[in-house]
């Protein structure tokens, strides 16, 4: 039996940033290669992307977001089950530039 073929170029997803549901980890460089203003720019960029989404833990149509920084070592700051709402994430997320020497990609 033949499977139906969906042409992604001609298919429209009814999803909007607010009603999609994803599990996303953001990996942020916090090594000495990153400047304080560069780190601030990156975190602001991530926040602006998440601002348009519904972040939370409910089943369906909410995005779960986690944050890992890396330099010499990797650090899990927030796991996927941490944030209960978009407002909570945008108001209380606190990531800092570690400026560790070196970048260990295998961390």
Image (spheres, rainbow, N blue to C red):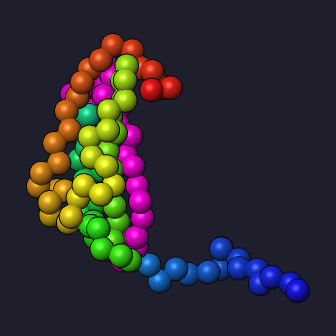
**Does the magenta-highlighted stretch encompass residue 14?**
no
Near-viewer residue (44 or 103): 103
Q: Which residue lies at the image location 24% right of the left edge and 55% below the top edge?
A: 82
| Residue shown at 40% from the left, 73% from the top | 20
Residue sitting at 88 percent across and 86 percent down?
1
Outermost residue toward the left in this view = 91
Q: Which residues are magenta?
A: 16-38
Vertical order, 24 against 37 (above or below): below
Percent coordinates x, y for residue 75 in the rendering: 32, 32
Left or right of 42: which side holds 91?
Answer: left
Residue 52 visible? The answer is no
Image position, residue 13 (x, y; %): 52, 80
Q: x, y (%) of residue 37?
A: 21, 31
Can the viewer see residue 38? yes
Q: Is residue 88 left or right of residue 57?
A: left
Query: Residue 65 lies in what quarter of the image?
Result: bottom left
Is 28 a magenta residue? yes
Q: Residue furthest right?
A: 1
Name the image quarter holding residue 4.
bottom right
- Number of residue marks: 0
Residue 87 is drawn in which quadrant?
bottom left
């Amino acid at each position: 039996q033949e499977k139906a073929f969906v042409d992604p170029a001609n298919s429209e997803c009814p999803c909007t940033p607010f009603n999609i549901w994803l599990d996303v980890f953001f990996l942020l460089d916090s090594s000495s290669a990153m400047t304080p203003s560069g780190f601030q720019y990156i975190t602001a960029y991530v926040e602006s992307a998440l601002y348009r989404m519904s972040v939370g833990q409910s089943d369906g149509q909410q995005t779960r977001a986690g944050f890992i920084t890396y330099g010499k070592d990797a650090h899990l700051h927030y796991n996927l089950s941490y944030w209960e709402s978009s407002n909570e994430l945008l108001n209380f997320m606190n990531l800092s530039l570690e400026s560790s020497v070196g970048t260990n990609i295998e961390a």
